[in-house]
Image (tube, grey):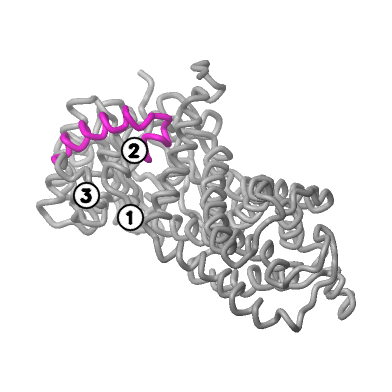
Amino acid sequence: MIPALAVRNVSHSYGARKALDDVSFCLSPGSFTVLLGLNGAGKSTLFSLITRLYAARHGEIDIFGHNVMREPGAALRRLGVVFQARTLDLELSVMQNLIYHAALHGIGPIEAHRLGQAALARAGLADRAKDKARSLSGGQMRRVEIARALLHDPRLLLLDEPTVGLDIKARADLLALVRELVQEKSLGVLWATHLIDEIANDDQVVILHHGKVLTADSAPAIVAGQGVANIGDAFTRITGAAREKLSA
Amino acid sequence: MSERAAPTGFTLRQYLICLSGVVWREGLRFLHQRERFVSALVRPLVWLFIFAAGFRQVLGVSIIPPYETYVLYEVYIAPGLMAMIQLFNGMQSSLSMVYDREMGNMRTLLVSPFPRWFLLGSKLLAGVAVSILQVYAFLLIAYFWEIEPPTNWGYLTVLPALALSGLMLGALGMLLSSLIRQLENFAGVMNFVIFPMFFASSALYPLWRVKESSPWLYYVCEVNPFTHAVELIRFAFYEKVAWTSLAIVFAYTSAFLVAAIVAYDPARGMLMRRGG
C-alpha cells in the first residue's frame, strides 16, 4: 500500500543550527498519527518542509507517492493543512474564507459554497457562515480551519499544534471531530502536539526530540517496549535517555 | 472554456478560478479597509491641492514633450501623483505580505497546489487592479480641478501604462517583502525606498531642471525606475508612447518579477534562510 506520507532521511538546518536530523517515518492512509515533541523539537520545521514552504536540504518527502519537490501540484492537492498560527482572514466572513481557499484549489464559487455549507454543518457551524471570522471563538476558528482544510477533499490532513490556546472542552471537541473524520473518510492525519493527553490508545506515535525521531510505533507498542505504565512515562524515559546520551 | 488538463493537472478554467479568487479576496480586503482607500486618495490630493498650488509660481515648467503648450504645475505633477498612488500601493501590498507571512495567512496561499509563480503573479495582478481603481478615483477628483487629458481617450490610453507601472512597483514590493525579516523593519522601506524613489524622479520637476542644478542627481533620476513609470504615464495620458521609458519599465518589471519568484522559490528562496 502506498503510504499517505513518507518522510525519508530528511535533514534541515538554519545556518549552523540543525533543526531536523535524518528524520524518517511513514503514515498509513486512515491512521491517526501523533507527532509528539516538546517545543523546539522540529515539528513546525517538518510541517514547513511537508507543505513545501521551503525545501529540505537532504532527504525526500512523498504524499501518496508524489514527491513534494518534484511533483508539488499532485502532492499538495492531496494535502489539507491546519497551521499552528491562525490563518483565517479575520476581515472576511466564514464562507468567504472557504470560497477563497476553494479558489486556491481550482474550485469555483458555486461548488465552493455547496461544499462549504456541508463542511460547516459537519463542524457544527452551519449558522455562522455569514459571520465575520473575527467574531468566532478560538475553538470555532479552529473548526472552520479544519472545515477549510478538508474542502478540496484531501486524503492527508496535517495539524500543527491545533489545540494551543483552546480551553479543555474546545480541545476535546476538536480531537473528537478529527478522530471522527479519520473513521468516516479514511483520512490520514498527522497531529503535532506536545500534550501527552491528546494521544489515544490505538494511535500511532512518532516521538521527535531535538530534530531526531527517537521512536515511531503504535502507542501500546511504545509503552510495552519501555516497560512502563503509560505513554507519558514512555516519553519521559525515551527523551530522558536521549538527553543522557547527548550529554555523555 | 478548455477542460484539457494542463501539465500540473489543472485546466485553464481552474487557473482562471484561482486568479479570480485571489483578485476577489484582495478586492474584498480593500473594500473592508476604507481608511486605506481614503488615505490612498488623500495623499496625492494633498500634494495636488496644497503643494502644487503653493509652488505654482515658484516652479515654472517650460514646454517639454508631451506638452505642446505651457501647462500649470498641477497638470505637470498629476502623472507623478498617479505613479505615487501605485508606489504606495505596491509597498502597501508588500507590507501586507510581510504581515500575512508573520500571521500565517501567506502559508494558505503558498500551500495551494498551483505553481508558485502563478500564485505570486495572481497576487501581484490583484494588487495592480486595486491600484488602478485608486488612480481612477484620483483622476475623477482631479477632473474637477481641471486636470484632464487633451481628449477623453487619454483616460483609456493611460490604462496600459498604469497596468505596466503597477506591475513594476508591485513586483518591487513583492521582492522587498521577501527580504524584510519582520514587520518592524518596514519603516526602513519608507525611508530607503519610497522617499528616494519619489523625490529622485521626474514626478515633481522635469529632469532638465535637475540636470542644471546637479548632474549626478540627474543620472540617479535617469536610472530610477520610478522616473520612467511617471514618464510612461505622462505620455500615455496624452495619447503618446514614451518608448524609452516603456522599454526600461518593461525591463525593470521583468527583473523584479524574476527576483521575487526566485526569492519565494522553496529551494532557493530567502524564506528558507530565515526559517520561515
Do discs 3 and 1 belong to a common subunit?
yes
Identify the residue at image location x=60%, y=67%: B145
Q: Is residue A203 visible?
A: yes
Disc 3 on helix, strand or loop? loop
A220 is within the stretch colored magenta: no
Identity of the amino acid at label 1? Answer: Glu
Packing grade of label 3 (10 A; few <14, some 14-19, many >=20) is some
Q: Indicate which disc residue A99 carries.
A: 2
Badges 1 and 2: C-beta atoms under 8 Å apart?
no
Q: Is residue A134 above or below residue A114?
A: below
Kindly identify which residue carries mark 3: A131
- Residue in front for this viewpoint, B233 or B113: B233
A123 is within the stretch colored magenta: yes
| Label whose residue precedes the other's in the sequence (3 or 1) | 1
Tell me where the magenta segment starts and ends, as one range. A100-124
Q: Is residue A108 above or below residue B1?
A: below
Badges 2 and 3: C-beta atoms under 8 Å apart?
no
Identify the residue at image location x=46%, y=35%: B18
Q: Is residue B211 left or right of residue A182?
A: right
Kindly identify which residue carries mark 1: A91
Subunit that carries the residue with mark 1: A
